[in-house]
Image (tube, helix red, strand yellow):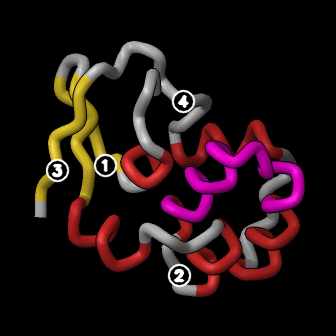
């Protein structure tokens, strides 16, 4: 996401055109956590997005397997599972919902 803050990317729950729709309640409560802390809270998709944004997917994969019991074979499979492959460059606005 072009010029979108880390916490906005992590807690994006959808898109409307060039606008990212952000879960404001989750962002406020969990926004300062890293990927492993989010994983411990059971916030798997948010944890994955944090690891992606921070460039830590290789380190995140074994933690994800251990925490969830899901035997994901690769980072690419994890990206397909969550439907998130990169930070989107086409996003220019953020809308926060509570």
Whether residue 92 is situated above or below residue 4 in the rendered picture: above
- Residue wearing tag 1: 13
Q: In terms of secondary structure, where does tag 4 sit?
A: loop
Q: CA distance from mark 2 to mark 1?
A: 16 Å
Residue wearing tag 2: 42
Estimate the x, y position of residue 56 in percent, counting from the top left: 79, 51
Which residues make up the magenta segment?
46-60
Classify mark 1: residues with Cα within 10 Å, few (<14), some (14-19) or many (20+).
some
> Which numbered disc, 1 or 4, marks the residue that appears first in the sequence?
1
Return the residue nearer the eye: 34 or 76: 34
Among the 4 quarters of the image, the one containing residue 3: top left
Q: Residue at x 59, y 55 (%)?
A: 50
Say what secondary structure mark 1 lies in.
strand
Mark drawn on residue 96: 3
Using the image, tell me which numbered label, if any, was put on residue 89: none
Circle 3 packing at 10 Å, graded few (<14), some (14-19), many (20+), is: some
Of badges 1 and 4, the one in the foreground is 4
User: Spatial distance from mark 1 to mark 4, Cα to Cα?
Assistant: 13 Å
For the residue pair 65 and 52, the one nearer the viewer reads as 52
Q: Residue 94 placed where, x, y %?
A: 23, 36
Residue pointed to by mark 4: 87
């Amino acid at each position: 996401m072009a010029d979108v803050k880390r916490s906005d990317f992590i807690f994006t729950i959808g898109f409307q055109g060039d606008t990212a729709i952000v879960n404001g309640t989750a962002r406020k409560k969990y926004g300062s956590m890293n990927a492993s802390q989010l994983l411990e809270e059971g916030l798997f998709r948010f944890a994955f997005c944090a690891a992606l944004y921070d460039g830590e997917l290789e380190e995140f994969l074994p933690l994800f397997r251990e925490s969830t019991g899901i035997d994901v074979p690769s980072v690419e499979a994890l990206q397909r599972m969550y439907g998130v492959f990169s930070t989107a460059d086409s996003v220019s606005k953020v809308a926060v919902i509570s």
